[in-house]
């Protein structure tokens, strides 16, 4: 009987504690090459781009998140044809984030986990182009855009381009010469950007102002070869606006690209409409990691695939409860134990009431 009473007392205490807690008060890149000046360092933590392609013209809006001690740096991007360059709208990436944010769902579990009562110890509030001349570098355009000095260049060989950069005060990594060779062979042009913070003697840190680069292209291509010069792992976020869902033809030496969103945007607005127009467009968002950037062996060539929509789902795991938040497992287990205890108690009482034969009296034969 004592064991039965202990079980009943434990269940009642757990129920009381749970109910009491319900009313208790709460206790409160990249596709280009970043080249800093001598004896300075700069690293690109993340390269984020939005790309619009209509079958003939490609527009890339790029934003970098950088770190280091560089006060000045150059950024070089190869392009297949003559490019127009302007400042991008920072709101574009915020708008894409809002359109593609994961769907939120609750997922319930029966048995309590480490973060559930009675195992949790947190009592917070619960808030949850034309061909260039041989052997030379041609400057086909130069303009000042905010903190950027943009030069559009042609070059017939990597050494000539390196000489131009050195003349303008930038050290050229030895490996860049070889990395530029495939673009020289295909007679691409280059966007060279000299950038510096607005404040004097400040270093380049955090998110830089986006740049918008537009050029003719018969295919959707995203230059990536120069990223192989990076010495640390790289992260690429690529949002693609086109007539159809687009995906890379290959991982080009990185992890497999992951589609985090694919869907049709019926009515683009704001900064997105300024890039894509006001007609319906497909938006594909890709994430890719390059743990070993030296393995990058090509640019991203993207192709149209089936327009299958996709949106990520983020689950919030919650303990299954009823009423005012009473765990179902507690009611189930507690109820079963109470029934078992009551049944045992009734069995004991029934046994006590059952008549027993007097050993001193014997019935007649």
Image (cartoon, rainbow, N blue to C red):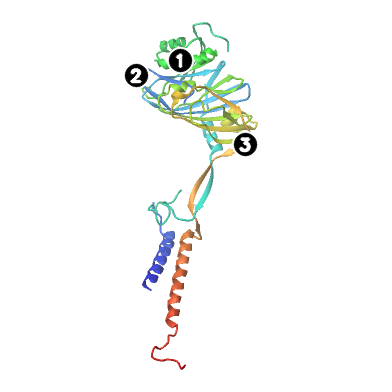
In the displayed orientation, state which residue is furthest to the left: 39
Q: Is residue 141 visible?
A: no
Q: Secondary structure at mark 2?
A: loop
Q: Quadrant of residue 357?
A: bottom left
Q: Relative to the observer, which residue lies in front, 339 or 83?
A: 339
Q: CA distance from mark 3 to mark 1?
A: 40 Å
Q: Secondary structure at mark 1?
A: helix
Q: CA distance from mark 2 to mark 1?
A: 22 Å
Q: Quadrant of residue 83?
A: top right
Residue displayed at 41% across by 55% down: 26
In the displayed orientation, state which residue is furthest to the bottom: 364
- Pick whichever of labels 3 and 1 is earlier in the sequence: 1
Label number found at residue 178: 1
Q: Secondary structure at mark 3?
A: loop
Q: Which residue matches tag 2? A: 39
Q: Position of residue 143 (x, y in %)?
A: 50, 16
Residue displayed at 48% across by 15% down: 180
Quadrant including the N terminus: bottom left
Mark 3 touches mark 1? (CB < 8 Å): no
How many residues crowd mark 1 within 10 Å: few (<14), some (14–19), many (20+)? few
Where 80 sits versus 332, above or below? above
Where 64 sits versus 124, above or below? above
Q: Relative to the observer, which residue lies in front, 33 or 306?
A: 306
Mark 2 touches mark 3? (CB < 8 Å): no
Q: Position of residue 354 (x, y in %)?
A: 45, 83
Q: Position of residue 85 (x, y in %)?
A: 53, 19
Q: Is residue 33 visible?
A: yes
Residue displayed at 60% across by 22% down: 219
User: Which tag is nearer the camera, tag 2 or tag 1?
Assistant: 1
Q: CA distance from mark 2 to mark 3?
A: 49 Å
């Amino acid at each position: 009987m004592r064991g039965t009473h202990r079980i009943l007392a434990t269940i009642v205490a757990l129920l009381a504690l749970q109910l009491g807690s319900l009313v208790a008060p709460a206790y409160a890149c990249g596709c280009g090459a970043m080249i800093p000046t001598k004896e300075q360092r700069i690293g690109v933590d993340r390269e984020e781009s939005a790309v619009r392609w209509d079958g003939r013209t490609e527009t890339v809006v790029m934003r970098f998140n950088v770190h280091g001690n560089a006060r000045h740096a150059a950024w070089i991007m190869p392009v297949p044809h003559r490019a127009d360059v302007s400042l991008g709208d920072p709101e574009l990436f915020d708008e894409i984030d809002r359109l593609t944010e994961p769907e939120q769902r609750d997922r319930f579990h029966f048995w309590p986990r480490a973060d559930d009562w009675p195992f949790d110890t947190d009592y917070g509030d619960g808030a949850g182009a034309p061909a260039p001349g041989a052997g030379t570098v041609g400057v086909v355009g130069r303009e000042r855009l905010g903190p950027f000095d943009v030069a559009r260049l042609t070059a017939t060989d990597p050494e000539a381009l390196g000489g131009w950069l050195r003349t303008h005060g930038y050290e050229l990594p030895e490996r860049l010469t070889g990395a530029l060779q495939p673009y020289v062979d295909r007679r691409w042009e280059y966007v060279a950007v000299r950038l510096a913070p607005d404040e004097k003697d400040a270093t380049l840190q955090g998110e830089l102002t986006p740049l918008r680069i537009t050029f003719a292209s018969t295919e959707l291509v995203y230059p990536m070869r120069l990223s192989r010069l990076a010495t640390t792992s790289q992260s690429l976020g690529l949002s693609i606006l086109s007539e159809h869902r687009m995906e890379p033809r290959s991982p080009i030496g990185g992890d497999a690209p992951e589609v985090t969103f694919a869907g049709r945007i019926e009515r683009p607005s704001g900064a997105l409409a300024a890039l894509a127009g006001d007609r319906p467009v497909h938006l594909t968002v890709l994430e890719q990691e390059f743990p070993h950037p030296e393995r990058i062996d090509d640019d991203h060539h993207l192709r149209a695939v089936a327009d299958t929509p996709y949106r990520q789902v983020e689950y919030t795991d919650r303990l299954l409860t009823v009423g005012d938040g009473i765990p179902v497992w507690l009611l189930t287990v507690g109820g079963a134990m109470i029934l078992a205890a009551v049944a045992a108690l009734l069995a004991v009482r029934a046994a006590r009431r059952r008549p027993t034969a007097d050993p001193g009296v014997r019935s007649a034969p």
